[in-house]
Amino acid sequence: MPRLFRLRHLLTPLAALLLAGAAMAADLAPAAPPARGGNGVSSHAPTRSGAAEAGVSRTAFAGSGGMGTALSRIKDLASVEGVRSNQILGYGIVVGLNGTGDTLNNAPFTKQSLQAMLERLGVNTRGASMRTANVAAVMVTANLPPFAVQGTRLDVTVSALGDAKSLQGGTLLATPLLGADGEVYAVSQGPVAIAGFSAEADAAKITRGVPTVGRIANGGLVEREIDFALNKLKTLRLSLRNPDLTTARRIAAAINDFIGGDSAEPTDPSTVVLQIPPRFQGNMIRLLTDIEQLRVEPDQGARVVIDERSGIIVMGKDVRVSTVAVAQGNLTVTISEEPQVSQPNEFANGRTVVVPRSNVKVDTEGTNKLALVKESVTLRELVDGLNALGIGPRDMLTILQAIKAAGALQADIEVM
């Protein structure tokens, strides 16, 4: 009996160690990717993926380790046609500036606006000489969001029109904001907050940021609503933010799988039309909230975006390159001037002259050789092949354009 007791106590910690090791192995095992159908629609909620792989040095890529496209909500890929914001603007006056406003002689519209405002308030200024630098004419802009009701607060932007130096400390007087149809939709008023500043003296001036543009948080008040009968719609049109035929078809397939039947179909790369089923008519909020949460795999064309000013290169995951040989080298010419002074001996009948001495050096970087970029199947292989050339981003701009001209780059190049 004592031997059995000892054996049992020996097996207990051993079993605990085995169970702990199995649990650790399960935690370290990579998560299975979400199952997808042939049309790129997720059949269940996506699982949490593992940590992303480290980026490649020099030219790096951002994305998941598998280089696949993540599932996205329809809410993030498309919007309901007609449900959008509208731009409104108005002309107003900012007062209370500390001598940094418009010069009335240089900005006659400011003087006329000030006189008209004072006359509306019962102050007669006709024939009077107005000399003030505490007023500035401004344009007031704002975005009117969809379904905004009366009393909704808006953020507005105030921009100087004349030669005002700064709007700091100013207050915008009540300004009506009009839409494209000429109707007043909001009114704005309040103190202007700016991020920049300007200070000057007789011989120096310092300016940080843009002191002639400011914002008024919650400075706009909606006075008129835009009618949109959402619940009366019989047909719903979804507009894709990035038009693509494959993505539009996948969105339609996801909606049909959820609703049933063939209610949704793509009409062009940017539009999916949905015939509202009878059970959802009059209850569009429920239908839209369900559709927005459906997830599909967006497709994208192969594209390389190049910003020549900053040297930034962005490549999509579907960019492919055929086998191509690339040679790159720079010609550097260095010219230096080292003038020498020729001075005669003492008591000699001569004069001091400056003799020019020039040095010209040419560096062709002859160590560069012809490099081979092999056919790439993934973006990582393409990045590794370009990094193997040992060149910087700015030189890579020209190389990518040359590879495209040679017909070896299967992607569109967009230069910003």
Image (tube, rainbow, N blue to C red):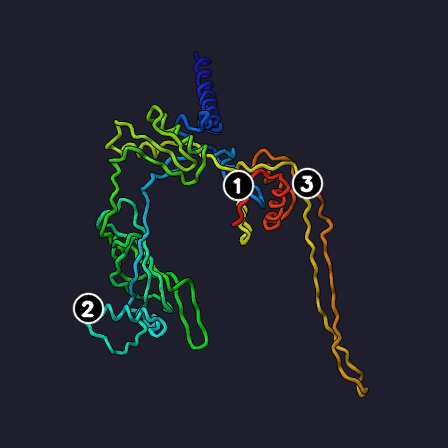
Residue at 25% from the left image edge and 56% from the top image edge: 187
Q: Nearer the viewer, residue 299 or 178?
A: 178
Please report contact status of discs 1 and 3: CB closer than 8 Å, yes or no: no
* Residue 350, disc: none
The secondary element bearing badge 1 is classed as strand
Amino acid residing under circle 1: Arg
Tag 1 residue: 303
Residue 199 visible in this rendered orientation of the protein: yes
| Residue 32: % across, % down | 46, 27
The secondary element bearing badge 3 is classed as strand
Q: Which badge, 1 or 3, comes first in the chain's sequence?
A: 1
Tag 3 residue: 325
Locate residue 355 relative to residue 238 in the image: left or right: right
* Residue 121, disc: 2
Amino acid residing under circle 2: Leu
Q: What is the CA distance from the residue labelled 1 to the residue labelled 3?
A: 21 Å
Q: What is the CA distance from the residue labelled 2 to the residue labelled 3?
A: 78 Å
